[in-house]
Amino acid sequence: MASTETKDRSGTGRPGDGASAGGDSANDLAGLEAGLDALESRVVDRQPWLRTLGSKALPPVIAIAIVLGLWQLAYHFELKEHYLLPSPIEVGRSLQDKWLEGTLLSYVWTSISRGALGFLASVVIGTVLGLIVARVKVVRAAIGPILSGLQSLPSVAWVPAAIIWFGLSDATIYAVVLLGAVPSIANGLVAGVDQISPLYLRAGRTIGATGLAGVRHVLLPAALPGYIAGLKQGWAFSWRSLMAAELIVNAPELGTGLGQLLEQGREFQDMSWVLSAILLILIVGIGIELLIFAPIERRVLRSRGLLVKS
């Protein structure tokens, strides 16, 4: 009783004091957590756009200048005869001639349209196959190693078989593209699914996200970083497979892509022609990577807090 009376006289037992103390404790904990987050997070000041542009554009420009300089030196000192190793200027003239003929864009468009169509088909097939392999243990044990083996198989190895199966047709080119790209996309998705925390999957089942709904709302979003990496690699394999197929499958009714352009240069023994075709193939491959896949990858990583500075 004495202790109770003393507590009442001091005023510590008045209603609301417990809630006030609890609120103060919660605020203190929230402030402590915010402080810890601030210590773990690196604050990055926004740089002026000119400095950002310079930091991103200057290194590749310098690298290209160095390559062109070494190329010009090799031409000047005749490491190879000039007809075997033309100068950068001569290769530029070859590209200019194709441009003035009005055929350059048609060559590029033929290959890009083939590559895009083949890649989209590969994405559909590779995604379905990757989900099945990732979620069905029996299927994974059966064909998982086969997918890895197919990914390491050079795409050009499929060209003779595809010609026998489909003849000199567009189907041959698309078959080679699919066989080259599908394993990479499927393996990328499998790797992404393997990295998902089991907690996410259990949470999805708890809220009723099962079956196709679970795949759409839980599995694919959680596996997105690995899936994007698989798509990037799938595009690289798709583009390489396409060039290998176009080099060999050469028929007038198929039109002329960059691979056929490269083969025509070889037939005419025109190294300026050959090097200009190689340059176009390189530019298209890098352009697709920088304009499409790199922004998507940055956005995905930034949304997950994995990219502090872009």
Image (cartoon, rainbow, N blue to C red):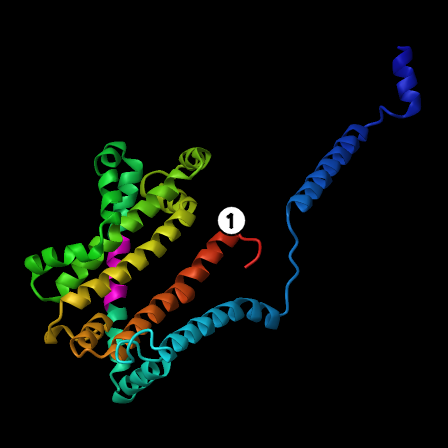
User: How many other residues sit within 10 Å of disc 1, few (<14), some (14-19) or many (≥20)?
Assistant: few
| Label 1 secondary element | loop
**Is residue 310 found inside the magenta-colored segment of the image?**
no
In the image, residue 302 sits, relative to residue 25, either above or below, namely below
Taking the image as shown, residue 53 lies to the left or right of residue 198, namely right
x and y, in percent, of residue 131 in the image? 30, 43
Q: Give the position of the C terminus as an image quadrant.
A: bottom right
Q: Please name the predominant secondary structure of the magenta segment in the image.
A: helix
Going by the picture, which residue comes out furthest to the bottom? 100
> Looking at the image, which residue is at 44% across and 72% down?
64
Counting labels gives 1
Q: Is residue 131 left or right of residue 56?
A: left
Of residues 172 and 222, the one nearer the viewer is 172
- Which residue is at a point 33% across and 83% down the rendered structure image? 90
| In-front residue for pair 159/182 | 159
Identify the magenta region: 114-124
In the picture, the quarter occupied by the N terminus is: top right
Residue 136 x/y as whole percent: 27, 35
Three-letter amino acid code of the residue under disc 1: Arg
Choose top left, top right, bottom left or bottom right for residue 104.
Answer: bottom left
Residue at x-position 49% and y-position 52%? 301
Q: Position of residue 45 (x, y in %)?
A: 66, 60
Residue 258 placement (x, y as % from top left): 24, 72
Q: Residue at x 22, y 41 (%)?
A: 146
Residue ranking furthest to the top? 1
Q: Which residue is mark 1?
A: 304
Tell me: residue 56, above or below residue 272: above
Observer-nearest residue: 38 or 238? 238
